Amino acid sequence: MSSPVNWSSIADDFQDSLLLGNGASIAVDRRFAYKNLLHAAERLDLITSELEEVFKYLKTKDFELVLEMLWHTHHINEALGIRTRKARTAYQDIRKALVEVVREHHCSYSYVEDLLSDAADFMMKFETIVSLNYDLIVYWAMMKGNRDRGNWFKDGFVKDGRTFDRDWQRLRKPYKAKGSTLVFYPHGNLALASSLTGREHKVVVGKASDLLGQVLDNWSCARSVPLFVAEGVSRQKEAAIRRSEYLATVYDEVLADLGDSLVIYGWSLGDNDTHILKTILEGHLRRIAVSVRTEHRKATTIRDKCQELAKRIRSHSKKIDVTFFSAESDGCWCNG
């Protein structure tokens, strides 16, 4: 297994698709280096004994699923005039937990603004981007890129974010820009939401710096429930995806149509995301480039990591040519 190369030496051969994992967010801000939302909420002592019972009853660790179930229960009880204190309290507690966790761990726009232009420049090199991250980094980079270069980035939500266009392929045609990049979230995102009737939409703001505040305000006022898959093993995540028209479309159509080449940045290809890897490799990919962090690591450690990742990919498809590159390379992601 050869050593990871610099990104610049392979960039011309990888321009079809980019997949961003949690490592991409951590590269922007170390505050994203936590295991998951539920563990973060537990560490902040935000999960009450009543909420623990709800998680146990539903046999899940999926934060988003419990939030959605309690949200619907709360509104149904309100409509029926049922004043169930426990259900109302549990809903309010988990809503508060989600808001507080995101406030604790999510950076502000001003904190990362200087890195967003580099991220947008990197993202522009690809026709399709899929982000597995729930945070707002990619959305902010899109807004930055579109402000500076025209309507380059598109996420499929039209009519001011109110509707996802099922005919998403038509959006590849450039509009008021020299090119286009389509961006999707297979596990959803904080900026995506679902109404009580199930209508899925995107949170839209005029200024990027207002986005996080608007998202948290929507949750606090119970206007919508966030559309993202936060926890669970691969099987549970796939089941959650099936509950959403948007997520199911991305999973079934977009992931199977990533072109000949794919760049993976900051994704560990862990067991919890086997469904994503399997679906991607059922497409027509011929080449995959995987980022590896090389800073302060021994050569043997890097080699072992590369072998592990290559083995995981080739266990699903032996026809794929796998290349490794240094995540710290110049011109890669937010490295400038």
Image: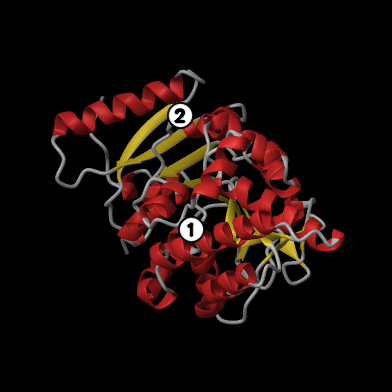
Quadrant of residue 280 within the rendered picture: top right
Position of 289 compared to 188: left or right?
left
Residue at mark 2: 271
Number of numbered discs overlaid on the protein picture:
2
Quadrant of residue 307 within the rendered picture: top left
Amino acid type at mark 2: Asp
Q: Is residue 24 visible?
A: yes
Residue at mark 1: 123
Verify CB contact (< 8 Å) between mark 2 and mark 1: no
Give percent across and percent down for residue 233. 52, 32
User: Residue at the location (22% across, 33% down)?
Assistant: 302
Give percent across and percent down for residue 182. 62, 55
Q: Is residue 15 visible?
A: no
Give percent across and percent down for residue 275. 57, 30
Q: For label 2, count other residues whose C-alpha is less than 10 Å away and answer few (under 14), some (14-19) or many (20+).
A: few
5, 49: nearer the viewer = 49
Badge 1 element:
helix
Instruction: Decide which of tag 2 and tag 1 comes sooner along the chain.
Output: 1
Nearer to us of marks 2 and 1 is 2
Q: CA distance from mark 2 to mark 1?
A: 26 Å
